Amino acid sequence: MNEILQALTVKELLSDVCRYVVPMYQRNYAWGEGEINQLIQDIHDYQKKNNKKRPENISTYYIGTLVVFKRLDHSFEVIDGQQRFTTLSLLANCLKVLAKNNESIPDMSWYQKSNIDFESRPKSTATFSALTNGIETYNLKGDEYNHDLINGFDLLCKGLLGLGNHLTDFCEYLFNHVQITRVHVPKDTDLNHYFEVMNNRGEQLEKHEIVKARLMSELNMIQSDSEKEACTQVLTTVWDATANMERYVQYGFSPKERHSIFGINDWGVFVPKNFNELMRCVDISSKSSQDTDETHISLMQMLKQPPNIIRDNNTELTSERFSSVINFSNFLLHVLRIWAKKDIPLDDKRLIEQFEEHILKTENPIEKIKEFTFTLLKCKFMFDQFIIKRDFATDKDSWSLKRLHWYSEKSSSYSNTFSEDEDGYKGINRRILMLLSAFHVSTPTLVYKHWLNGTLYYLYQQEEVNAQDYLAALEKLARQFIFLRFLKFGVGTDYFAMIYENLESGSNEINFSKLEFENIENNFVFNYLDYLIWCKELNSPNNEKIEIIEKFEFTFRSSVEHFYPQHPIEGHTALSKNSLNSFGNLCLISHSKNSRLSNFQPNAKREHFKSSIADKKIDTLKLFRMIQLLEIDGTWWEEQIKKHESEMFNLLVNDRALLENEKL
């Protein structure tokens, strides 16, 4: 770290003799219950993970950034991060108050008074003074106090007390192992312009931007000036090109570089084989440095412009037609795992920690940074070409699987990744898209997308991606998740072992009890069955295809519904528990529909979905099969539940046999 970037523990920050001034142009304190509880929970999660570690092995949790400007009186003007800093100051005051009646709180004598001031805000200043002096909040109801600060103080006290006997460990970890990165803005910065830009960002400096600055700092240690400049420029170019997950990576380079990196008159192949070849493809001369301090340049450029905007006359800015299934911070962890081939957590809260462990604090970090930079670019290229996105090209957004292709100097456009002329609801491109979307809607959160990691790892190893081989790899991955983890007897196989070690331990038996209500580990079991139903229908020799199945699209449905209700309305018989909670009586719908329909009888539910079915739409194909069976038999009872369950189980049994064949 240098004087521009300085990592401080929370204790070091709050006990700093320097004064921190929140200027008038900053907004008032605005954190509420959601932000405060999330902060406490995040720190508590990390504290628990480190409970049994030796002191020297305890990992650091990075809480964010504090951007400051040093005034002539040596105080620090807080430009960005004041909400978090204010919350930490309130928290320390809260602990001092609680310590009077709670022996589990560690000694807080080191915190004598807050070191944060509020410029031209007498209410905020008076409130902090009162809280520091231990005045109870019920005595601070007048107009002369800032009630948002008082509310934040009360919420923090409530949240801390809620930790119970974990409070002591929480405090020790918070003050000694939670760090904030203080960033100094240079003296010649136009603060009015800077703050306007920060408002446009609408967010603090991201963790991935801190990682970039740390990587640049390491490259700045290269002895050869020419090599140092070339390496830092390649990292900067690649990082900025890949950081916008909504834009295809080719548009992060100049036209000349696109032809060199992604194929002359093509843009659809990945040419370089390693970092050195990539460095020869990047036009270093057009990106000459204006300062020898590369860390300074990279960080201040990130701070002075909105994220993901490339300010290069040779680079095109494209409209954001697509929406990505993941953000850049989480994507970096997927790339790091693929590069290191180690079981790296796919949680962006641990981003900086993981880069420190696997690159920054290792032997020869410079070579590792080069290797990672190459891996990052190739993974982003593969991601853009072969992973689904949400496409907003028309009024009706939909899933798309498209590649970028060069046609002429004046024309480049998107077409299907496979089977360019494929249209409608059939073909290999559509089938791959369907399975990818089945994976994605089953894990809608940004963290722990193991399906994406497995898919990217496969793609990264390919020189050329063949459609049939890619589909086979995706289906194998799906079967591994289903049969070696979700429906395996005993403990399910670890994701990392399945993906990186090709571990396929386990018997051929399917543990169908894991499909009973409240035993289902992941909704992918529902979505994969929908995929199997969809494939079976399309491959049927019957020429009278059911249009609703052909047009089916995976959407975010996360609520497991009992088709025959758990609590039937008066006058209807309750099902036996075994039939009620069996897989044959379960389907996946949205939370809103579940809350509206939960006590309805199957016939009433069928009527509810009638108009959607008429429009060739349905929540899930398993639900459609259940409605079809209800219409054929005229009732939905134990016999129909067993019949439907048997059909679903047969689909799984037949598919399990395919996994066995793949081992041969």
Image: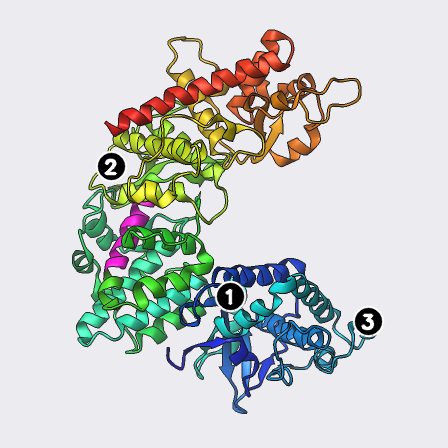
Name the quadrant containing residue 368.
Answer: bottom left
Q: Residue drawn at (65%, 65%), measured in percent from left and top?
A: 160
Where residue 396 appears, x then y in whole percent?
51, 34
The secondary structure that most of the magenta stretch takes on is: helix
Label 1 crowd (10 A; few <14 / some 14-19 / many >=20): some
352 or 309, which is in the foreground? Answer: 352
Identify residue for label 2.
465
Q: Which mark is residue 422?
A: none
Where residue 365 appears, x then y in whole percent?
26, 67
Screen quadrant of the C terminus: top left
Residue 377 covered by magenta stretch = yes
Kind of residue at badge 1: Gln
- The relative height of residue 475 versus residue 299 in the rendered view (above or below) is above
Where residue 546 appears, x then y in whole percent?
48, 14
Q: Could you tell me which secondary element the residue under label 1 belongs to? A: loop
Where residue 136 appears, x then y in whole percent?
78, 75
